[in-house]
Image (cartoon, helix red, strand yellow):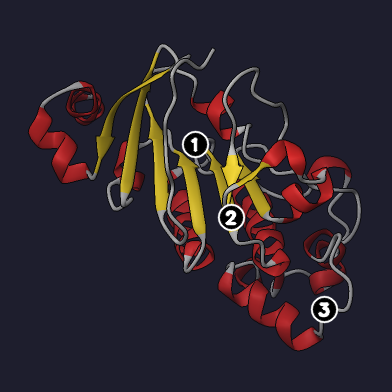
């Protein structure tokens, strides 16, 4: 799927992967937490080949927020601190405020002890995403992976989730796939993929000036 990819993402940088459907964005993204490995070449984390690191080490280094938030049939609090032991109430409440979870939980009768049902059936899409973001904040992973995290939300929910994501991305190395290109305009490195190859790379302003594939994609979204 991926061919002749050569790409460097610097610590603390936000890199956005964009391109038409089937370009290889998700395939490239999924190499970071080792959902699968490359057949040739290598993926390096601080000069270490991921295949030489344990899966637990690789995956504890990154947090994933995708369009399908993974929610368990337990309370809101248990969903947020899942996999993290010894979290103080003070840290927990701050995380909930930063992720805007507090905005909707304060109106629930059982607050953070509210049971969410199977796959979070009692929550809206935006609420589930905010819980997913809170979980990512509390894990303190240095790498953040965002796979079309707001693509299934209405405009009001998207605005709230984008606000929470902005706080989450602070001081993290972030790799982002976004359905709406307007959400990645501020990325320091925009990587344009097509047919499994990197065909353009740079900032939003750089790529607009090139009047290539990225500029066309921006124009098409503006028209629609």
Marks 1,3: beta carbons within 8 A: no
Q: Nearer the viewer, residue 218 or 55?
A: 55
* Mark 3 lies on residue: 87
Measured as percent of width and height from the top left, residue 168 is found at 54, 64
**Camera-side residue: 222 or 116?**
222
Q: Is residue 84 in sight in this rendering? A: yes
Residue 41 image point, x, y percent: 57, 25
Check the image and report above or below for 85 versus 152: below
Q: Position of residue 80 (x, y in %)?
A: 78, 63
Identify the residue shown where x is 72% and y is 61%: 135
Query: Is 33 rendered above or below residue 105?
Result: above
Quarter the N terminus occupies: top right
Residue 151 image label: 1
Secondary structure category for the residue under label 2: strand
Examine the image and state in which quarter residue 152 appears.
top right
Q: Does 186 sit above or below residue 141?
A: above
Numbered disc 3: secondary structure: loop
Please report whichever mark, 1 or 3, sits nearer to the chain's N-terminal start: 3
Left or right: residue 153 compared with residue 185: right
Left/right placement of residue 130 relative to residue 77 reads left
**Residue name at image x 32 percent, y 40 percent:** 190
Q: Locate the C terminus and report the quarter of the image it occupies.
A: top left
Residue depth check, mark 2 versus mark 3: number of the one nearer the observer: 2
State the residue in front, 199 or 133: 199
Do tag 2 and tag 3 residues touch (Cβ < 8 Å)? no
């Amino acid at each position: 799927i991926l061919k002749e990819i050569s790409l460097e993402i610097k610590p603390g940088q936000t890199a956005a992967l964009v391109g038409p459907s089937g370009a290889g964005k998700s395939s490239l993204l999924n190499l970071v937490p080792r959902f699968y490995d490359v057949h040739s070449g290598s993926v390096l984390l601080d000069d270490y080949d991921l295949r030489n690191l344990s899966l637990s080490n690789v995956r504890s280094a990154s947090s994933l927020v995708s369009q399908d938030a993974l929610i368990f049939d337990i309370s809101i609090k248990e969903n947020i601190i899942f996999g993290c032991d010894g979290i103080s109430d003070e840290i927990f409440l701050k995380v909930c405020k930063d992720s805007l979870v507090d905005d909707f939980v304060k109106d629930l009768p059982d607050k953070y002890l509210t049971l969410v049902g199977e796959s979070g059936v009692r929550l809206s899409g935006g609420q589930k995403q905010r819980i997913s973001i809170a979980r990512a904040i509390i894990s303190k992973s240095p790498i953040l992976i965002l796979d079309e995290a707001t693509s299934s939300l209405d405009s009001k929910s998207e605005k709230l989730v984008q606000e929470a994501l902005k706080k989450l991305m602070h001081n993290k190395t972030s790799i982002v796939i976004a359905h709406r290109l307007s959400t990645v305009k501020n990325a320091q490195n925009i990587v344009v993929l097509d047919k499994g190859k990197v065909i353009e790379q740079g900032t939003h302003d750089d790529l607009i000036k090139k009047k290539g594939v990225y500029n066309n994609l921006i124009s098409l979204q503006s028209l629609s």
